[in-house]
């Protein structure tokens, strides 16, 4: 357990450094720790039965009495999505601006924790104290309402923690980036800048939501039949743009997807989208002419239970897409989701649906800063130390090089689990701590590298075999072995017969003392089953053996 001393300022990422998603950042000083964000990531094809992964907070869980608070920069899943799962392990107060608090409270209600987790709303541009840290919220622009950077002040210096951000002169919903405050922090003197690296390889600027709104209106007006637009549910400026494009084309907008409805409700609860266009219920949309409807859909990442996937597969209860209709993907593909999005788009094309993506038209702009925006903020903040986060290792290394080109004296590339001392200087890596992964499995949370998921992966790739041996007290067979195989093509039964023969041979060759011992007999049978399957198929099945003595 690491206890920060009074004369040092530490930084540690347990998630979001070396990957995009699962953000969990810690700052340590004077015997206390401060957590910034607690988010999730999404599973890939190597995690059967798992949809959500999250950082393992074991390091800070061991010293949770030193944790002064969990501060959420904004309401994206990769920044607050793990609070309901992991808060019982941490039990620290949570701080967020009104919109993030509204989104979080809905999640806590589902988890039965809304009356348990202390959530304090901090106003935009608010200042608050979590000793020994003094914090100031700084308004930024991003692809969600109320994105915040943080000025984290300590006696050893001020850290500018960017959160997720971009510079958008026309964000359409919410305020513009507070340039005056960023300049002030630079003038006051910033020790370090811990900064988003997502788009460090992208030249120029991310682009404005206003451009997307103009293009969506043009595309919807040009469409002949139904239009379905999918985007991130949290990008409420985009959702509003789609609805306004529908109205401009004399069409009725339809919100389809629970996440979309919940986000709009949360925004309206906080005073946003109060003049959002009236939407037609899904149950009535099917009665409208095809050229009079725009479906605003969840499922931009190919999620199998989202609206766009149901439309592509023709199994939505109320809505349908047909030949001649148009599907617009107003989003980017999150790395790792390429296959699921590809399957979704192929299914739509098979139905005769025309697809438009950001490679065809400007129907999406990123919420993260491109290189020119990164340079601009480095010029405003002028930190002594640059710590890239929110990116894969390649992003972080490139970001460090960019920071050096901006005359930042020191850069530290610190993947998850790397303990960095920011002050007193020079900045340096002082230790490494475990930074594991957890998975939401059904209603529980389990280690991603735990036994249950290892077995599931093995089952996925190698299949399974079960054998039952009926023997007497001396281990002599009383009936032929019974074998069940899963995950193999064995319609003619040849493999099953070969496994039975292998077990019978094992029984005849095994020493009497081994046949009389359940543990040794079970081991020998497991080896025999695996040997036969491997010889026939090159697979090592997950194998169960049951010994029945009569």
Image: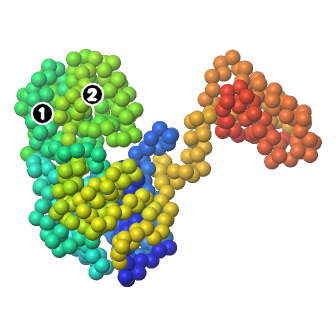
N-term-proximal mark, 2 vs 1: 1
Q: In this view, does 228 lie above or below 377?
A: above
Count of numbered labels shown in the rendering: 2
How many angstroms separate mark 2 from mark 1 (CA)?
A: 28 Å
On the rendered image, what quadrant is the C terminus found in? top right
What residue do we see at 35% from left, 75% from top?
A: 425
Residue 94, given in percent of the width and then of the height, sits at 31, 66
Instruction: Tell which of 142 and 313 is nearer to you.
Output: 142
Instruction: Find numbered disc 2 in the image and state the secondary structure of the residue it sits on.
Output: loop
Residue 9, given in percent of the width and then of the height, sits at 36, 75
What residue do we see at 25% from left, 16% from top?
A: 323
Instruction: Find numbered disc 1 in the image and state the secondary structure of the residue it sits on.
Output: helix
Neighbour tally class for label 2: few under 14, some 14-19, many 20 plus, Cα within 10 Å: few
Neighbour tally class for label 1: few under 14, some 14-19, many 20 plus, Cα within 10 Å: some
Which label belongs to residue 510?
none
| Residue that numbered label 2 is attached to | 318
What residue do we see at 36% from left, 41% from top?
A: 335
Q: Is residue 389 left or right of residue 368?
A: right
Residue situated furthest bottom in the rendering? 6
| Residue that numbered label 1 is attached to | 215
Residue 188, given in percent of the width and then of the height, sits at 17, 74
Q: Is residue 457 above or below residue 271?
A: above
What residue do we see at 56% from left, 46% from top?
A: 453
């Amino acid at each position: 357990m690491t206890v920060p001393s009074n004369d040092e300022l530490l930084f540690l990422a347990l998630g979001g450094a070396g990957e995009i998603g699962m953000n969990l950042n810690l700052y340590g000083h004077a015997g206390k720790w401060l957590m910034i964000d607690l988010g999730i990531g999404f599973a890939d094809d190597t995690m059967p039965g798992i949809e959500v992964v999250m950082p393992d907070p074991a390091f800070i869980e061991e010293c949770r009495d030193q944790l002064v608070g969990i501060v959420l920069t904004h309401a994206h899943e990769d920044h607050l999505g793990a609070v309901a799962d992991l808060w019982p392990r941490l039990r620290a107060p949570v701080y967020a601006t009104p919109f993030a608090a509204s989104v979080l409270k809905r999640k806590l209600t589902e988890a039965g924790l809304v009356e348990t987790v202390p959530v304090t709303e901090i106003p935009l541009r608010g200042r608050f104290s979590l000793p020994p840290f003094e914090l100031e919220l700084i308004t930024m622009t991003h692809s969600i309402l109320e994105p915040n950077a943080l000025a984290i002040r300590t006696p050893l210096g001020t850290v500018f923690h960017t959160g997720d951000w971009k510079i958008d002169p026309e964000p359409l919903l919410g305020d513009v980036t507070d340039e005056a405050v960023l300049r002030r922090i630079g003038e006051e003197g910033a020790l370090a800048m811990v900064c988003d690296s997502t788009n460090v390889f992208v030249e120029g600027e991310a682009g404005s939501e206003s451009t997307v709104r103009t293009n969506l209106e043009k595309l919807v007006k040009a469409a002949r039949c139904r239009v379905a637009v999918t985007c991130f549910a949290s990008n409420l400026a985009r959702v509003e743009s789609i609805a306004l494009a529908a109205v401009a084309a004399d069409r009725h907008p339809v919100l389809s997807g629970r996440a979309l409805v919940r986000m709009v409700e949360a925004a309206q609860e906080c005073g946003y989208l109060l003049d959002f266009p009236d939407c037609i219920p899904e149950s009535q949309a099917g009665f409208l002419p095809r050229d009079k409807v725009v479906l605003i859909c969840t499922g931009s990442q190919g999620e199998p239970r989202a609206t766009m996937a149901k439309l592509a597969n023709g199994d939505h209860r109320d809505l349908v897409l047909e030949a001649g209709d148009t599907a617009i993907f107003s989003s980017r593909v999150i790395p790792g989701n390429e296959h699921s999005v590809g399957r979704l788009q192929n299914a739509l094309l098979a139905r005769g649906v025309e697809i438009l993506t950001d490679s065809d038209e400007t129907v999406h702009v990123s919420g993260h800063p491109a290189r020119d925006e990164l340079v601009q903020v480095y010029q405003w903040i002028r930190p002594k130390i640059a710590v890239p986060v929110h990116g894969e290792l390649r992003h972080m290394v490139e970001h460090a090089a960019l920071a050096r080109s901006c005359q930042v004296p020191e850069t530290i590339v610190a993947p998850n689990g790397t303990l960095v001392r920011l002050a007193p200087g020079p900045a340096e890596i002082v230790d490494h701590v475990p930074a594991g992964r957890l998975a939401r499995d059904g209603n529980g949370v389990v280690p991603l590298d735990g036994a249950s998921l290892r077995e599931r992966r093995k089952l996925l790739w190698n299949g399974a075999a079960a054998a039952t041996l009926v023997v007497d007290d001396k281990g002599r067979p009383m009936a032929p072995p019974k074998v069940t195989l899963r995950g193999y093509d064995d319609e003619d039964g040849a493999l099953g017969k070969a496994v039975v023969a292998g077990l019978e041979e094992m029984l005849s060759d095994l020493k009497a003392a081994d046949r009389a011992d359940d543990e040794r007999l079970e081991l020998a049978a497991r080896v025999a089953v695996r040997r036969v399957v491997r010889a026939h198929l090159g697979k090592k099945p997950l194998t169960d053996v049951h010994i029945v003595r009569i």
